[in-house]
Amino acid sequence: MSTKKISRPRGRPRGFDPDYAVTAAQRLFHARGYDAVSVADVTSVLGINPPSFYAAFGNKVGLYVRVLDRYAGTDAIPLHDLLKPDHSVAECLTSVLEEAARRYAADPVTTGCLVLEGIHCNDRDAREAAGAFHAAAEGLIRAYIATRYPEEAERVTDFVGTTMAGPSAKARSGHGRDRLLETARLAGRTIALIFPD
């Protein structure tokens, strides 16, 4: 009888699903924040070893970028759908704020906005990755406003961005959907004073 130890094969386990891994990691990062999630947390949830993790994603920031890509495509506010050229600017911006409120409070575990919370993390590379997604979203809003009100685009984009950040933080501290929607609607009334079209 042989006493030779049989070692597990190196690399990713058979059946490793990177898409599932990104989905599971998104939930972790969204629930806890980037800084509070370790590689050990991720490998434990996925049932893989660290070498498999590094082979699949490079590092924690690499996984986070994949998570942000997925979030932008599946769970982020659908700006392209809400910013309609044939509707009033105030109506569309209010719709954006209301949709933000709904999404921020939709799941009691993953409250707030993954991107907005990510721009405050301690890791510079992760913060810059989240910042790029945030800047792209604000760029869409600014461009939408500028098509009809170029002189107002900068300040109203700043107002919308600030208004979205507040409810994200409030959702993470326990504010529910109805309360966040009230904030969104109040902000919408303010925007309607600027754009009475």
Image (cartoon, rainbow, N blue to C red):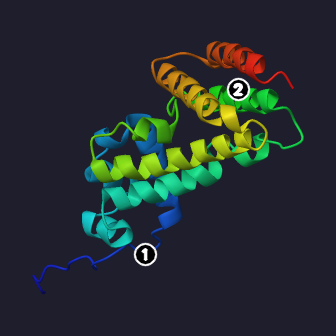
Which x, y percent locates residue 122? 27, 41
Taking the spot 26% from the left edge, 69% from the top edge, the residue there is: 51
Q: Quadrant of the rendered structure where residue 12 is?
A: bottom left
- In the rendering, which numbered label is found on residue 74? none
Q: Examine the rendered structure and indicate whether residue 106 appears above or below residue 19.
A: above
Residue 23 in sight in this render:
no
Taking the spot 74% from the left edge, 15% from the top edge, the residue there is: 189
Name the secondary structure under disc 2.
Answer: helix
Image quadrant holding the C terminus, namely: top right
Between 171 and 89, which is closer to the camera in this rendering? 89
Q: Is residue 82 left or right of residue 174?
A: right
Count of numbered circles on the image: 2
Q: Callout 1: few (<14), some (14-19), or many (20+) C-alpha neighbours within 10 Å?
A: few
Tag 2 near tag 1, CB within 8 Å: no
Between 50 and 129, which is closer to the camera in this rendering? 129
What amino acid is at disc 2? Glu
Which x, y percent locates residue 4? 11, 83
Q: Earlier in the sequence, mark 2 or mark 1?
A: 1
Image quadrant holding the N terminus, namely: bottom left
Taking the spot 64% from the left edge, 41% from the top edge, the residue there is: 142
Q: Quadrant of the rendered structure where residue 63 is?
A: bottom left
Which x, y percent locates residue 31? 44, 36
Q: Is residue 78 left or right of residue 7?
A: right
- The residue carrying mark 2 is 98
Between 78 and 11, which is closer to the camera in this rendering? 78
Q: Residue furthest front?
A: 151
What amino acid is at disc 1? Arg
- In the rendering, which numbered label is found on residue 14? 1
